[in-house]
Image (tube, rainbow, N blue to C red):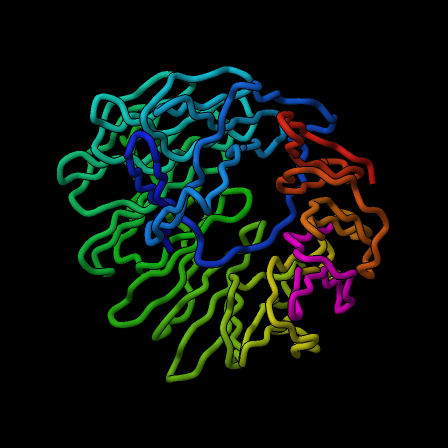
């Protein structure tokens, strides 16, 4: 699904439409990794005379300056080694990346930092055209630019651009041949040597899934790909997509290194909510066959109870089942398909962020009853807050980390595997995604306190 946001510049009178690709629901996964910075350090200090731009709003909303409170838009890199933020000076905007201030522009697009924090890219309006600015250097001008994407190694940047009636995929400043249709948001392979994207068309039977080298000279093309976006596993080396076969659909999946070796699923009348597990050897999705609603795990089928799925189904790490936050009659609960005791338990008004421990014996998600939010760990409910966000399970399965808000104060909570609070971290003005460090012995996250932007690492 794609979402439109409009960025309003009140003084300049400029309206920028950003087309952002976002999943229709979110798959919760571990955010631990060996590349996460493991020491606390101040990454930047916002200058006293720097002013934040007004906040973006939905394209369907009328901006009301009296109701909007400007705040700095801060972006931390995944590794915690880099940070950027937007500032406004008069009618101009600029990006400050790792304390280096970029050129001023009348309007800017979404700012993206490479995973290692060392590079930055964003669209900028200059001379009546949109140019992608990468590390301060402006690229070719286009009528339209979409959000940039860095490769896993941070060496390459890709984005979609439109000029006249043609869309182009641009990699490191070089566009492909283009199409009068459009492209879906691309993805780099794990080794950063290939790029994957879909060329859309008038009908799903004419769509193409393309695996290309970064110069567009060598390509593998799979035709008749359905209108569901493809999905990559966590390590970006395995791909799953839907394929049109006559009036039916099926799921195909394959290694990006060997796209000729394709595993095909059964034919269904409808396929949705496609996802793939972290290692890339299992796919799960919802399907319709002969009027029967199913959840599918590889070649296994199970009838899916009635209800809505606010998030993608999640393959358990042991591959014995699928976790689903399933909502019906204004309540939601955890359903575990293909598992010995599937059932729905502990129903809530709202739930989000399902995740499993690495041994599959532990699960966690955030839930709400009335106005009260709390973490749920293996059916046990934690203490009540005004908001709970994105619980994460430590690699050893002994700790749960999550962001919480209470009486306007934001902080991180560390709980045990019974949802009982072990420690509550200090309050900060803003807190960004919580991750476990590579050794699993600490949690790390970005914070903003007044004008300091800090990468904070706290031992468990």
| 254 displayed left or right of 61 | right
Q: Which residues are magenta?
A: 366-393
| 281 displayed left or right of 90 | right
Residue 138 at what x, y percent from top left?
32, 19
Relative to the observer, which residue lies in front, 460 or 34?
A: 460
Residue at screen point 37% across, 37% down: 147
Q: Decide: is 326 above or below 153.
A: below
Helix, strand or loop: magenta stretch: strand
Quadrant location of the N terminus in the rendered image: bottom left
| 184 displayed left or right of 118 | left
Q: Decide: is 315 above or below 278.
A: below
Rendering quarter of residue 193? top left
Residue 248 at what x, y percent from top left?
30, 71
Relative to the observer, which residue lies in front, 410 or 445?
A: 410
| 223 displayed left or right of 3 | left
Which residue of the protein is positioned furthest toward the left in this rendering?
Answer: 165
Quadrant location of the C terminus in the rendered image: top right
Q: Is residue 390 magenta?
A: yes
Residue at screen point 40% across, 77% down: 288
Residue 42 at what x, y percent from top left?
68, 22
Relative to the observer, which residue lies in front, 346 or 386?
A: 386
Residue at screen point 66% across, 79% down: 343
């Amino acid at each position: 699904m794609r979402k439109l946001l409009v960025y309003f510049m009140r003084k300049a009178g400029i309206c920028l439409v950003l087309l952002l690709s976002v999943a229709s629901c979110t798959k919760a996964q571990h955010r631990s990794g060996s590349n996460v910075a493991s020491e606390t350090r101040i990454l930047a200090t916002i200058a006293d005379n720097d002013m934040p731009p007004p906040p973006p709003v939905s394209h369907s909303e009328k901006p009301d300056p009296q109701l909007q409170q400007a705040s700095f838009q801060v972006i931390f890199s995944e590794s915690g080694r880099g940070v950027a933020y937007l500032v406004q000076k008069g009618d101009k905007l600029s990006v400050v990346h790792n304390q280096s201030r970029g050129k001023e522009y009348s309007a800017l697009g979404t700012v993206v930092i490479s995973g290692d924090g060392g590079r930055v890219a964003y669209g900028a309006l200059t001379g009546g055209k949109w140019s992608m600015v990468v590390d301060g250097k402006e690229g070719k001008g286009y009528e339209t630019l979409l959000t940039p994407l860095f490769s896993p190694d941070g060496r390459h940047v890709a984005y979609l651009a439109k000029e006249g009636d043609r869309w182009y995929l641009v990699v490191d400043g070089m566009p492909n041949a283009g199409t009068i249709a459009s492209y879906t948001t691309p993805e780099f392979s794990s080794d950063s040597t290939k790029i994957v994207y879909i060329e859309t068309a008038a009908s799903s039977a004419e769509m193409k899934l393309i695996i290309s080298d970064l110069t567009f000279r060598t390509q593998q093309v799979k035709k008749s790909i359905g209108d569901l976006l493809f999905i990559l596993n966590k390590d970006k080396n395995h791909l799953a997509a839907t394929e049109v076969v006559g009036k039916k659909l099926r799921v195909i999946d394959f290694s990006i290194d060997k796209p000729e070796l394709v595993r095909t699923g059964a034919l269904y009348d409808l396929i949705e909510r496609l996802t793939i597990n972290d290692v890339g050897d299992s796919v799960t999705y919802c399907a319709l066959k002969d009027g029967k609603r199913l959840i599918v795990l590889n070649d296994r089928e199970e009838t899916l109870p009635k209800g809505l799925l606010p998030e993608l189904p999640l393959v358990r790490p042991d591959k014995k089942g699928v976790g689903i936050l399933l909502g019906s009659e204004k309540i939601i609960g955890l359903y575990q398909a293909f598992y010995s005791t599937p059932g729905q338990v502990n129903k809530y008004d709202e739930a989000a962020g399902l995740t499993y421990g690495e041994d599959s014996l532990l699960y966690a998600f955030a839930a709400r009853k009335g106005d009260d939010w709390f973490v749920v760990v293996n059916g046990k409910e934690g203490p009540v807050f005004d908001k709970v966000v994105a619980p994460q399970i430590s690699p050893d399965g002994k700790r749960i980390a999550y962001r919480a808000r209470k009486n306007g104060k934001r902080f991180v909570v560390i709980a045990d595997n019974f949802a009982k609070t072990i420690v509550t971290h200090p309050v900060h003005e803003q807190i960004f995604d919580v991750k476990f460090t590579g050794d699993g012995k600490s949690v790390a996250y970005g914070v903003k306190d007044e004008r300091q932007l800090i990468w904070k690492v706290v031992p468990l």
